Amino acid sequence: MSVTICFDFGNTRFKAAIFKEKELVEVCVLENATVETIAALLIKWDPNKSILSSVIHHDKAIEDLLMQKTQFHLLGAHTKINFTTPVGKPETIGADRLALCAAVVHLYPEQHNLVISMGTCITFNFISNRQEFLGGSISPGMQMRFKAMHEQTALLPLITPSNEFNLIGYDTKTNILSGVILGIAAEIDGIIGAYEEKYGNFNVLLTGGDLSYFVPHLKKRIFADQNLIFKGLYAISEKNN
């Protein structure tokens, strides 16, 4: 049985997903991005193939290990992908955005798709029905906004994310929760609306570690898929390995 392990090294989380044949069987959050942690996963799953998407300065010894033990691919500008990138500097597109675009082209071919990723930053990624990644936008994510208000003011506390708040906050904590979470939800709905005016019908997919805080507050129709990036990484691995 063919086993593929897909690694996603983000700014705040390190995750891995295991596919047996074409089926996603497990997703795990890694304590760290060290050679020892990766080696333990390889021993546990004995994969045939591996792929790494990284937006951090990871230890290059991890790549060496994966090349020794598996058919390995590092996601980057040289990667063969299932869409084109007619943007100004395609080599600057983040590995995570490449994986997300690959996933939606694989799942929803020949359709307009807007992928919104809720992580350290919020990225909006638009892929046309001609399989072209046209670009999008990047804005501060939820945690970044909480931290900015705490660090750049004298008295505002650092808030832990929660959906326990009302539209009208009744204390400092709920005021911040309402402002950040409902503010981001309104931002997402507004940007989706702007795309609707330009492109008409398209799929909207929401993914990323923070998506659960926003799904209840969005007015626009979306598909929520926590594992979308791994589906894209698997598709890219199959094309490149």
Image (cartoon, rainbow, N blue to C red):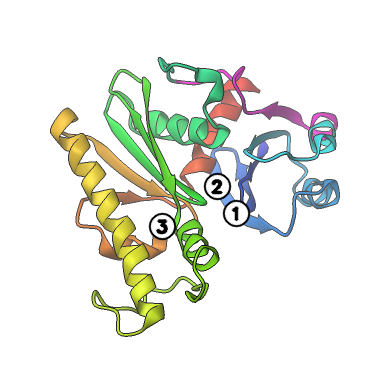
Q: Magenta segment range?
A: 66-82
In this view, the residue in front, 196 or 66, is 196
* Residue carrying label 3: 211
Structural distance between the alpha carbons of marks 1 and 3: 16 Å
Residue 175 occupies which quadrant of the picture?
Answer: bottom left
12 over 68 or under it: above or below: below
Image location (x, y in percent) of residue 78: 62, 17
- Mark 1 touching mark 2, by CB under 8 A? yes
Which image quadrant: the N terminus?
A: top right
In this view, the residue in front, 143 or 108, is 143
The residue at the point 42 percent across, 18 percent down is 87
Q: Is residue 12 left or right of residue 190?
A: right
Q: Is residue 70 magenta?
A: yes
181 over 173 or under it: above or below: above
* Residue carrying label 2: 24
The residue carrying pointer 2 sits among few (fewer than 14), some (14 to 19) or many (20 or more) residues within 10 Å by Cα, namely: some
